[in-house]
Image (spheres, rainbow, N blue to C red):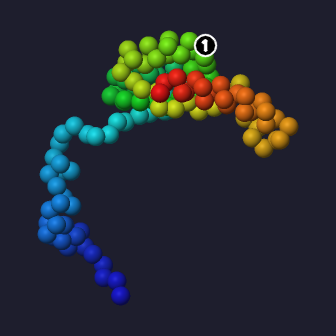
Amino acid sequence: MSHPVSRRNFMAAGLAFPPLFNSRGLSAGKADITVGITVDTRPDWSGPQNFIRSIQEASEAGYHAIETFWPYVSRWEKNPQGLKDELDKRHLKLETVSNGAPMRNDFVDPGKRAGVIEDHMKLVNFIKWFG
């Protein structure tokens, strides 16, 4: 038979087990996590033409990492250091790059498999450059 637990009873029980409610978890301080954002979350950030603006504003808002899309960063395909420099200036890390046009994305059609793999391997190799 289960017994409902009130918030008061839960907290009282927690006080009996201090390690569950240590001061580190209850006090303000530097977090052990980083916070990222997808830089296509606002209308004025969307599109490759607004990528630099989006990462600048994300940095100013305190984000540490970004996710973006291939069309936004493909201009750096042959110069990933150029993108790394843009991110470093803003103290941002590139967390991931998702696919997008003009990449081939028909994962179902076996006749298009080789092209899909080719395009996505370019993406994988680009992302690997960022560690």
Location of mark 1 (residue): 78
Residue 58 coordinates in the image, percent (x, y):
40, 26
Residue 43 visible in the picture: no
Q: Is residue 131 above or below residue 79?
A: below
Quadrant location of the N terminus?
bottom left
Q: In the figure, residue 6 lies in which quadrant?
A: bottom left
Q: Is residue 59 above or below residue 25?
A: above
Locate residue 46 relative to residue 33 in the image: left or right.
right
Residue 32 visible in the picture: yes
Residue 41 coordinates in the image, percent (x, y):
50, 32
Residue under the image location 44 percent in, 33 percent down? 37
Residue under the image location 46 percent in, 17 percent down? 84
Q: In the figure, residue 17 lies in which quadrant?
A: bottom left
Outermost residue to the bottom: 1
Residue 113 coordinates in the image, percent (x, y):
79, 37
Outermost residue to the right: 111
Counting every numbered tag in the picture gives 1
Check disc 1 and give the amino acid type: Lys
Residue under the image location 56 percent in, 12 percent down? 79
* Badge 1: residue crowd in 10 Å (few <14, some 14–19, many ≥20): few
Query: Which is nearer the eye, 20 or 59?
Result: 20
Query: Which is nearer the eye, 49 or 76?
Result: 76
Residue under the image location 27 percent in, 75 percent down? 5
Kind of element beneath mark 1: loop
Locate residue 32 relative to residue 53 in the image: left or right.
left
Query: Which is nearer the eye, 101 or 79?
Result: 79
Residue 100 coordinates in the image, percent (x, y):
65, 30
Locate residue 86 relative to residue 122 in the image: left or right.
left
